[in-house]
Amino acid sequence: MGTGMRRVASGLVIVSAAAVLAACSQPAAPEGGATASTAAAPAAAAVDPAKAALLASLPAPYNTGDLENGQKQFQLCRSCHTIAEGGANMTGPNLYGIFGRTAGTVEKFRYSEPLKASGIVWDGAKLDQWLADPRGFLPGNRMSFMGVKDAKDRIDLIAYLKVETGHKPGG
């Protein structure tokens, strides 16, 4: 490949990487997926006794979830959603307390009519269906996310959300 072609190819890689990073609102991760700022968090989450106990109390298959991978999968969601108690609504609603909540009911968030009218009560199974294909699961909703296609990644993401969003054991 000539020098000019290498520069063009190199430029395309840089532009593509920048677009991906901007879409995710996250810093680039080194090989292995962790950044300096997030490397310690998943490990801490995995050994935190309270989080480990909550994970173990979840119904199958979520009790086998990998919280580190779930946190990694949540990076796909962070540009639109927060998960902290009292966290802000962004492009999407805050997800704290999502499990057991009726879809379309977070105050001060403008939902699509199909989501408000759906009557969905979020649990692991419904969220799994939603995350696999948001547009196919509920046509007409405004979520532009294409979904998490890998079933294990969805299990890990849902387990992470259950642990991090105020899920109560048995709920």
Image (cartoon, helix red, strand yellow):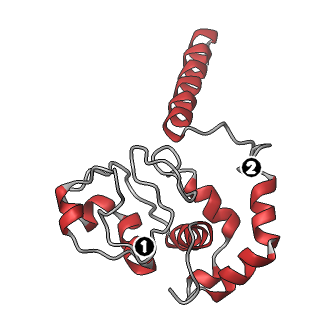
Front residue (pair 112, 166): 166
Circle 2 Cα neighbour tier, 10 Å, few/some/many (<14 / 14–19 / ≥20): some
Q: Find numbered disc 2 in the image and state the secondary structure of the residue it sits on.
A: loop
Q: Are marks 1 and 2 in contact (CB under 8 Å)?
A: no
What secondary structure is marked by label 1?
helix
Disc marking residue 69? none
Image spot of residue 116 (x, y percent): 22, 63
Residue 52 picture location, percent across and down: 74, 78
- Reply above or below: 161 against 72: below
Residue type of the residue flagged with mark 2: Thr
| Residue 98: percent from left, percent from top | 45, 68
Please identify the quadrant where the N terminus is shown: top right
Q: Nearer the viewer, residue 87 or 23?
A: 87
Foreground of the two, 119 or 1: 119
Residue 121 placement: quadrant:
bottom left
The residue that label 2 is drawn on is 38
The reply, left or right, for residue 91 in relation to residue 34 is left
- For residue 80, side relative to residue 64 (left or right): left
Residue at 67 percent of width and 72 percent of height: 66
Disc 1 residue type?
Asp
For disc 1, the marked residue is 128
Q: Residue at x 74, y 49 (%)?
A: 38
Crowd tier of the residue under label 1, counting other residues whose Cα lies within 10 Å: few below 14, some 14–19, many 20 or above:
some
Mark-to-mark CA distance, 1 and 2: 25 Å
Whole-percent x, y for residue 124 in the image: 45, 78
Q: Residue at x 38, y 73 (%)?
A: 101
| Residue at 65 percent of width and 63 percent of height | 69
Dot placed on the residue nearer the N-terminal end, 1 or 2: 2
